[in-house]
């Protein structure tokens, strides 16, 4: 038995797999995000810990015999979050999340101070961890002075479970302190942020053991004492492992809180000019590239919240209405690929007195698809766009939404049977690979997951025409901020 823990932005998921990777059970606990100021996005790490305990007790109530046979635990989580601890391991402030845009000024300063682009292959963006620490130093100097340990969100859970300060290569690459090609902390980049390697967690590949679970937790959760904890991966790299996206050219599209187009590689490609992310993958000797839309399924969630209509009903109305002249820029938390414009904000264009809720719902789905199409083109320019993609994330339940993406990218999309638990599944799979390294060869030979549907691209001239108008509007929007 293997356990995968995925600390997302909107929920924490735990999945239990048997030794053949069949999904036995899962537990999900919702999380909330705090926005103390416009553009700020934070969570309390204690809320993560309470959610994990709740999820584990739910599993224990249903799967006590299976949990006694657990062999290892893997981790996945939202990337880039700055979790700051003092020398006693106490949290100093709420975690600054990946979709927080407060550190735009610090980004410009850091790019002038050190060769972040050359060493990491990435632009310095407000969502990444490095500029967040410079912001803390400038605006909360007393907290910065007490900071002894900096952990990514999932690695805080690892610390609470074992006392180890450890992380993996894929998640650590998103801090902008990792020399991505060498897979090691860069002293030059840390010095630029007035930090040292002693404040960083120990680095492991995603399929390596970092420590063992505390006996007290093993007893409380009904697990074997000495259960190994495995490094795991950032959420997107973990999803890739769960979906079998490992070989160069394999790819997926994620419609979660954020939207991602991900492609695996056997070398370190980069396109920093268009905000393509170039990170380590979760397994040794592999890298990956990503194009990111900050507000994907969260755009539909936002629209549902202000209309008091369920997301499912809005998605249905979107299918029944043509968007017509209405367009939506999904920049509710800023824009990432290709413009890297953290302060730009979303907008509807082309509204008229005839516009109905269904037209706006359709525009929201199309706007997210348009933004992902922008990202796909940035990957093409980097020379690493996938020829087909596997779908994951909660939004992947909408075949209509996936069809829009397929038509815009002209890329076939495979819908697996477990599209909504990809990251947690990948974390559990990394736990298995730590104990059974030979399973990797079988995985690479049979990497396409069980398929529920295949979305084939179609020609939609009217959709392409709206996409061209979307590009004109959003280019103007983003260039005002850039």
Image: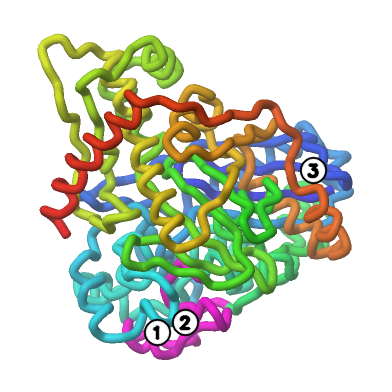
Q: Position of residue 146 (x, y in %)?
A: 36, 79
Q: Mark 3: few, some, or many residues within 10 Å (few <14, many ≥20)?
A: many
Residue 356 in the magenta stretch? The answer is no
User: In front: mark 1 or mark 2?
Assistant: 1
How many marks can you see? 3
Who is closer to the viewer here, 453 or 113?
453
| Residue wearing tag 3 | 17
| Residue wearing tag 2 | 199
Q: Position of residue 98 (x, y in %)?
A: 38, 56
Quick check: 256 above or below 364?
below
Quick check: 100 above or below 329?
below
| Residue wearing tag 1 | 190
The image's colour scheme reads rainbow
Who is closer to the viewer here, 250 or 310?
250
Which residue is located at x 27 percent, y 78 percent?
111
Whether residue 94 is visible here, answered yes or no, is no
Segment colored magenta? 173-201
Q: Which mark is residue 159?
A: none
């Amino acid at each position: 038995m293997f356990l995968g823990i995925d600390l997302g932005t909107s929920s924490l998921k735990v999945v239990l797999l048997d030794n053949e990777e069949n999904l036995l059970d899962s537990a999900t606990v919702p999380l909330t995000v705090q926005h103390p100021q416009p553009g700020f996005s934070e969570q309390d790490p204690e809320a993560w810990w309470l959610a994990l305990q709740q999820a584990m007790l739910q599993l224990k109530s249903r799967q006590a015999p299976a949990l006694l046979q657990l062999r290892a635990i893997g981790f996945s989580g939202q990337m880039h979050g700055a979790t700051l601890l003092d020398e006693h391991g106490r949290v100093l402030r709420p975690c600054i999340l990946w979709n927080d845009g407060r550190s735009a000024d610090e980004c410009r300063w850091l790019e002038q101070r050190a060769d972040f682009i050359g060493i990491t292959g990435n632009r310095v963006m407000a969502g990444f961890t490095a500029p967040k620490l410079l912001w803390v130093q400038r605006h909360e100097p007393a907290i910065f002075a007490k900071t002894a340990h900096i952990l990514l969100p999932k690695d805080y859970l690892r610390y609470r479970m074992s006392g180890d300060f450890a992380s993996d290569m894929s998640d650590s690459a998103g801090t902008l302190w990792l020399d991505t090609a060498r897979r090691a902390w860069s002293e030059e980049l840390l010095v630029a942020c007035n930090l040292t390697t002693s404040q960083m967690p120990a680095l492991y590949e995603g399929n390596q053991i970092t420590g063992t679970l505390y006996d007290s937790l093993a007893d409380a959760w009904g697990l074997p004492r000495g259960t190994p904890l495995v490094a795991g991966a950032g959420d997107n790299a973990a999803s890739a492992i769960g979906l079998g996206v490992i070989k160069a050219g394999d790819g997926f599209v994620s419609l979660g809180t954020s939207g991602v187009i991900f492609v695996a590689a056997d070398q370190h490609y980069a396109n920093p000019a268009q905000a393509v992310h170039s990170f380590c993958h979760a397994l040794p000797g592999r890298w990956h590239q990503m194009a990111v839309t900050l507000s994907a399924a969260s755009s539909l969630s936002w629209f549902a919240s202000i209309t008091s209509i369920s997301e499912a009903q809005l998605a249905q109305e979107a299918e029944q209405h043509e968007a017509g002249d209405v367009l939506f820029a999904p920049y509710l938390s800023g824009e990432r690929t290709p413009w890297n414009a953290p302060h730009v904000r979303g907008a509807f264009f082309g509204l008229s007195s005839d516009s109905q809720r269904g037209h706006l719902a359709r525009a929201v789905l199309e706007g997210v698809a348009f933004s992902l199409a922008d990202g796909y083109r940035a990957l093409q320019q980097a020379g690493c766009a996938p020829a087909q993609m596997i779908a994951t994330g909660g939004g992947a339940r909408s075949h209509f939404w996936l069809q829009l993406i397929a038509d815009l990218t002209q890329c076939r999309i495979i819908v697996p049977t477990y599209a909504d638990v990809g990251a947690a599944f990948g974390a559990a799979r990394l736990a298995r690979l730590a104990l059974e390294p030979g399973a990797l060869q079988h995985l690479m030979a049979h990497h396409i997951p069980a398929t529920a549907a295949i979305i084939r691209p179609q020609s939609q001239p009217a959709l392409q025409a709206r996409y061209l108008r979307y590009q004109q509007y959003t280019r103007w929007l983003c260039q005002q901020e850039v």
